Image (cartoon, grey):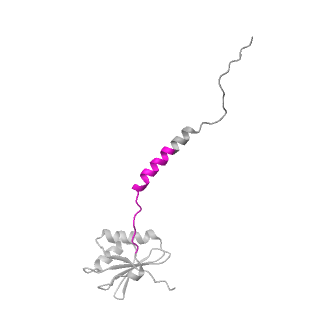
């Protein structure tokens, strides 16, 4: 006699319960940690609220191919690199003289920021950017 032994019902399906548990734990972790990351508040300057200058500024010009020029009182000096630029600005600055940077529209952002960074590292705190007002 043959005896058939029943081993229970075998299912050819994937058990998704552990995956659901993992997803619920991850969901709870993200829900708890998300309020901790507050986005930074950035106050961008607007063209309409420009501060009045107390003295004539020193203008630093940057072309799209990273060539520099320093202008003050109708005198323009061509500069080769950033270290020379910082030295020239430090030689021209008197007291509380502001520095304004005018960069070509196609100048890389990195070039402008590197100039601002070098000026701040040299102790020059009054640095602003020149923008052109849109018509219409």
In the image, taking residue 29 as reference, residue 121 lies left or right, namely left
- Locate the N terminus by quadrant: top right
In the image, taking residue 41 as reference, residue 93 lies left or right, namely left
Find the residue positioned furthest to the left. Answer: 95
Comparing 136 with 80, the one in front is 136
Q: Image point 44% across, 68% down: which residue?
A: 110
In the image, taking residue 121 as reference, residue 12 lies left or right, namely right
Q: Is residue 39 magenta?
A: yes
Comparing 105 with 7, the one in front is 7
Q: Image point 30% across, 70% down: which residue?
A: 122
Residue 129 picture location, percent across and down: 39, 77
- Residue 103 quadrant: bottom left
Task: Label the magenta part by its dominant secondary structure.
Answer: helix
Comparing 40 with 8, the one in front is 8
Q: Is residue 44 above or below residue 15?
A: below
Residue 43 picture location, percent across and down: 39, 71
Q: Number of marks in the image?
A: 0
Comparing 81 with 14, the one in front is 14
Find the residue positioned furthest to the top. Answer: 1
Find the residue positioned furthest to the bottom. Answer: 74
Residue 132 picture location, percent across and down: 45, 83
- Residue 74 quadrant: bottom left
The span shown in magenta is 24-44
Q: Is residue 47 magenta?
A: no
Residue 2 picture location, percent across and down: 74, 13
Q: Image point 31% across, 80% down: which residue?
A: 98
């Amino acid at each position: 006699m043959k005896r058939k032994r029943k081993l229970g019902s075998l299912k050819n399906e994937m058990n998704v319960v552990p995956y659901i548990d993992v997803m619920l734990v991850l969901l709870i972790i993200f829900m708890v940690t998300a309020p901790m990351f507050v986005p930074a508040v950035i106050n961008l300057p607007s063209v309409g609220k420009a501060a009045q200058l107390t003295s004539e500024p020193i203008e630093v010009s940057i072309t799209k191919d990273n060539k520099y020029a320093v202008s003050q009182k109708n005198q323009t000096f061509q500069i080769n690199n950033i270290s020379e630029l910082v030295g020239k600005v430090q030689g021209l600055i008197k007291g509380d003289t502001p520095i304004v940077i005018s960069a070509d529209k196609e100048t890389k952002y990195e070039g402008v920021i590197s100039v601002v960074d070098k000026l701040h590292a040299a102790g020059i705190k009054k640095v602003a950017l020149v923008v052109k007002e849109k018509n219409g």
